[in-house]
Image: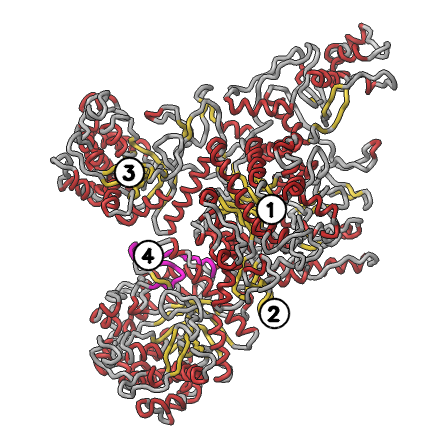
Amino acid sequence: MTQKRNTFSKKNSFGRSDFPEGFLFGTASSAYQYEGAINEAPRGESVWDTFVRKYPERNCYSNADQAVEFYSHYKEDIQRMKDINMDAFRFSISWPRILPLGKKSKGVNQEGINFYNDLIDELLAIGITPLATLFHWDTPQALEDEYNGFLSEQAVDDFKDFAALCFEEFGDRVKLWVTLNEPWVYSIGGYDTGRKAPGRASKYMNEAAVAGESGLEVYTVSHNLLLAHAEAVEVFRNNPKCKDGKIGIAHCPVWFEPYDSNCPDDKEACERAMEFMFGWHMDPTVYGDYPEVMKKSIGKRLPSFTAAQSKKLRGSFDFVGVNYYSAFYVKSIPEVDHNTPNWRSDARIEWRKQNKAGQTLGVRGGSEWDFLYPQGLRKFLNYAKNKYESPKFMITENGHCDIDYEKKPKLSNLMDLQRTEYHKKHLQSIQQAIQEDGVKVEGYFAWSLLDNCEWNAGYGVRYGLFYVDYNNGLKRFPKMSAMWFKEFLKREEEIEESEKEEYLLKSAMKKKRFLLATGSASCFIPKISKCLLLLLLITLACIGVLAKNHSSRPRLSRNDFPEDFIFGSATSAYQCEGAAHEDGRGPSIWDTFAEKFPEKIKDGSNGSIADDSYNLYKEDVNLLHQIGFDAYRFSISWSRILPRGDLKGGINQAGIDYYNNLINLLLSIGVKPYVTIFHWDLPEALEHAYGGFLGAEIVNDFRDYAELCFQKFGDRVKHWTTLNEPFTVVHEGYTTGEKAPGRCSSFTNPKCFGGDGATEPYIVGHHFLLAHGAAFKIYREKYQAIQKGEIGIALNTVWHYPYSDSQADKLAAARATAFTFDYFLEPIVYGRYPADMVNYVKGGRLPTFTPEESSMLKGSYDFVGVNYYSSFYVKDVPCATENITMNSDSCVSIVGERNGVPIGPAAGSDWLLIYPEGIRDLLLHAKLKFNDPALYITENGVDEASIGEIFLNDDLRIDYYAHHLKMVNDAILMGVNVKGYFAWSLMDNFEWSEGYTVRFGLVFVDFENGRKRYLKKSAKWFRRLLKGEYNGARQKVAPYVTIFHWDLPEALEHAYGGFLGAEIVNDFRDYAELCFQKFGDRVKHWTTLNEPFTVVHEGYTTGEKAPGRCSSFTNPKCFGGDGATEPYIVGHHFLLAHGAAVKIYREKYQAIQKGEIGIALNTEWHYPYSDSHADKLAAARATAFSFDYFLEPIVYGRYPAEMVNYVKGGRLPTFTPEESSMLKGSYDFVGVNYYSSYYVKDVPCATENITMNTDSCVSIVGERNGVPIGPTAGSDWLLIYPEGIRDLLLHARLKFNDPALYITENGVDEASIGEIFLNDDLRIDYYAHHLKMVNDAILMGVNVKGYFAWSLMDNFEWSEGYTVRFGLVFVDFEDGRKRSEAICHNLSLGLTRGTRRCSRSLPGAEIVNDFRDYADSVSRSLEIDKALDDVKRAIYSGKIRQLRKVKLASPYKQIGTTLIQSHMHADRLATARATAFTFDYFMEPIVNGKYPTEMVKHVKDGRLPTFTPEESSMLKGSYDFIGINYYSSYVKDVPCATENITMSTDSCVMVIGERNGEPIGPKNIESLIQMKRRMGVTVKGYFAWSLMDNFEWAEGYTDRFGLVFVDFENGRKRM
């Protein structure tokens, strides 16, 4: 196992440390594509400036006059490089920026020199190495005009002068230089095809070309480029400032594969292509001449070098720059037309995207020539190494493009998974070339840091690691690829060391040895000297530290995940509960399988005891609490609550009680139960009756069982999973027979208990699906609306990768997934089996769904659980013709290694190969193929072999979780809706057919020593992860003040009609100014108006809100009004009042107070009812008449065109020029109040009963074709549709100049039900989904600066009064307006992820109904267990109003030390007697001077002494305080003994430790203490027993009570 840990780290830590020391990682750019500033500094024109202006149609009508303004923003962009841990930056120096006219003799531009000096200095200051390119295609236009640029040899001298100037100015700091970038592209594109500047070519090559001669000029230009290179290198090597520098050319090879791999001509064509593309410019720098094949083919058209030139060229490089992007197939051309010479015909080749078999070399990117073929780079490096005697290489460009001609930011632009994979795989190929092939590669430059102007493709393709928003000030946003590089390039010292554990020498000496496990093999030698053992431990510790220091474990915190993300741990009933034959539980098929046939289990064990969680569940819940998990996923044992599997066989109440107790305890500590209904433990009775899931009867029995669960637990359980891993059951239970019920075909395993692996798996899978559908249906129809829960299914698969890049293997990988994961997901999403299954399962063996079944299944999920552990490779194989099983139907072979290399290291189980990327890819598959479902990771974990020792130092598990959680987080960033993560497993348990031979737990269970639990290191790692970094330091609360929120003074309404009167403008301005004067020194965020549209609509159009005005035909009860005119007048005055307030703030206060001012506008978002153009226009009109109504005037100074066109009869006021000027730009931010969305239909415009509502000629409805846009909240107008907030924000950004936005209101209500209601899961879901949409909008470039939830507390909701509640805090309007937040505070529940929250069920934490006396006046006892239920009912029924003191006759009667076994009157009296014979026995004499009445009554024959009057007087009141030693038990009434009489029999009670199988546990003492405190008992102190373990009387040292462990065998050391 230890070696596997090392392998795992190596495999999964691919990063900087896998490359040689000093290897450079950087990004690349070029001057023309980045700098912009064409008219600054003063830069001369280049051939590209001329080309794009002269021929815009040949350049996508784009130019680089602005580019990405790197000239102005280089400092910020350099910081971006540093932020993602880059070492180097490759940039080019603009020849015309340094020499505007191309020649040194015609003037040097000092401002250009200064810019590059500043750039270089900034790079060096921040620790980034500069690599400068001299020529990246931007020939000065002046030289093109003078002598046709590089067509003339004159260019050689001018380039030499330019290079010499650069070396002199920058060579003291720049030590890496490229003379020429891609001379092949420059020559071919500019002079053979004419597609690039200067655009020269023969007409037969390019009709648009106006001059040029293809097949000739191309070679002339390259010849002169090579001569220029040689001259520059000579100058470089002779300049002292360039000492220790390196120089080379950046070539641009693609890799070639033969079109027909069996054709010798095509293979030869590949060699020829490499010579013509790479050798053309490489051979001269190595050998001083062109390749022979070129000279032979081209003849006299290819220039020749003089001897002197050849000498200068030979060895004119220190490294070979490689710009590699893609690969192609090449087909040989036997004959060419010699009348139309060109480079490609000279090479006699054709480039093909597909080979003869129709295959591509890889996934296509954004351009037609961009294919992902990373192995091509490795092949090229080896080719060049072998041909040119192992030169040094620098990968000077490598990148991936995507198309984006819309130039609108989309989420997909940022989640560039394909680019991330591109870079990763190419880097892996480079690393393999270095380590395995001995290629000398010194650096890697990703193209490109930023999206930019991609030459004649303009801005329509993007290569950047950072997204550039061309429509929004060229703002930059990091893409997923940038974040990947940041992680990939972390240095070792940045990587968090794993927690250091100290182990004492004595640990190894104990009977149970705790091993110090590290990255090296460890063992325990029984007869080892102490000195040698100490040396061994020290050595292992050192190795462990080294391993830790070299770990690349991702650094994660809870903050990396969405705030509502759930972290939990998972178990299952049979694996953990034990108590298989206790309390009425019936046998399951696993009891039969494991107990009757132990040979089926690896170690012959079974789950009859397992972890004994049935009896130790309180301890397990405490472990969850210690670690800090939010949730616990467990399963219900079907046969524990229905011993015979069906309702007619009877319900086992003890089983119901067990799960009730577990659920209640979880809720009491704030842990959410996530319950699985079926986790493989089918009742044996149903297997015996009709074959279990082989019988169609199972569907109804499962439905009934599920409904029983909903009935008994659904009031508290809000997350249900119907089935866990149905595929595992059909595969291993009915195909291979390895798991219960152990069925398979005899040819698979003759020891199976019958079966047919070709048919039964499909029957069982079909019944699984129908059972799931039936359970889902009944939950949704009868329980979901009331219980407000969600229900889903947990599916598993390994992730499948093609064994090779062949199309057959890719299809095979897809089939493998179709036969596992999609097998069950496609039916519940689309109501059908996957097409691959339908096509490959022959002979009618795959069942079909009836239309009714398909309809029932389709959409039968609220979420999908994903159980992921491992990944495998998949090969296509011929379909079997005999021995058919489900396994053979898919016609695939699933293997764990490729070419002898495992996909990942094996864990404790040989099937578990660790490959974290698989979980991300599986999640993306689920998102993209299945309509973006809500997903939970319901299981994910790793095991180690059980070695017979206590093993806690599980670094492998920590690495596994860290890497997998990183991949989950990446998936979330890519838009996958992952809502939670459950680690498998909370504790070591019975691992099915592997028994106890492997361990998956975060908690070690000692199966040989009472099932004792020990937290492993991984549990502590989770505890640190989950500590709640949202619980940071207390932050100041900034006031955001709204000046007008509808509460107009009545005096102004009476004086001039309020906002109907123009006078309101000045009065509002004066009121606003008063606010600025009095509060503006502290208030920095002002909102003038809140939702003016709501006022004009509901105050003046419908009359539903104050002042209640409308047309009489709208509502005769309105207080006057005209809905056709008044709304527009009021709206107009609102806008002018806003403008006046902003004007005075800006003129008099803003500069001094340094605040901002805006307006809060509302609308629902409007979607077209249909795809008709009319409805689309109607939706736009609806928005224009609500949101744009007020935003367009303050942005542009005018009303929306739709309003101007549709409000007839001059009813829409107009702005004067002065008013328009005042309004235009009258905002620093815009507040957005969003709650809901609606559909909009186009309708004919009204011709009578005209109001503002009819003017827009639309109908706004909440449903389409009978389907609501979203579920209804407490108010019927609030239909929940989170996507609307995103789309509204994007609308504001795109239409209104990208304003700064705040979400000033967003929330959801529930109906007020007259009871205290705190369990507002709907609200949590609402906020979570809406905040996710807000975050998506931000990623899309929307400038959202904040979010305000409506509302802090329940309040008066305008015309709805107190009938609905929007608050985060419950307000009890019937009891002094008490806030539920105060209860949370009293319970000492702190901030959880920044939000104060109460425990969901609150048993024992809320106080309290008065307890009624049930016995005579002498004795009382607290009915704790009953009280828990009573208190809970009281909370939900609204009966609790205040904390009351219980009025009792004497102080001692407030304390009860024993608990009731049942609620029978006899047991209550027995409890009173038990108390009288224990606590009251000594308490009553010192309080009242007498023995308790129960003792006097029950102690017969004068055996109880009596006090004399003097003794009684002395005793009475003989205390200042009472000490209470509390431990507790349950009590039952029993008949009084008639023989063998002792004091214990006199009370006629039986004292026991459990009730209905439930131990009394710690819950009751906690509840008791809290209840006492709430009831007013004076508790002055608390003493824990005991400080340390000690001699426990008759039990000696067998029990330990201590807070401190005492090692009695090792000098009584304390720990």
Specify whether residue 739 is in view: yes
User: In x, y percent, where is residue 1254?
Assistant: 20, 34
- Residue 707: image quadrant is top right
Magenta span contains residue 104:
no
Marks 3 and 1 sit apart, C-alpha to C-alpha, by: 65 Å
Ranked by sequence position, the earlier of labels 4 and 1 is 4
Q: Secondary structure at mark 4?
A: strand
Judging by the rendered image, the residue that carries numbered circle 2 is 900
Q: Residue furthest top?
A: 1509
Ranked by sequence position, the earlier of labels 2 and 3 is 2
Specify whether residue 1133 is in view: no
Marks 2 and 1 sit apart, C-alpha to C-alpha, by: 40 Å
Residue type indicated by callout 1: Leu
Number of the label disc, if any, that sits on residue 694: 1
Residue type indicated by callout 2: Gly
Magenta span contains residue 483:
yes
User: In x, y percent, where is residue 63?
Assistant: 26, 66
Number of the label disc, if any, that sits on residue 1159: 3
Q: Residue furthest front?
A: 843
Residue type indicated by callout 4: Asp
Residue density around tag 4, few if under 14, some if 14–19, many if 20 or more, within 10 Å: some
Q: 1064 or 53: nearer the eye?
A: 53
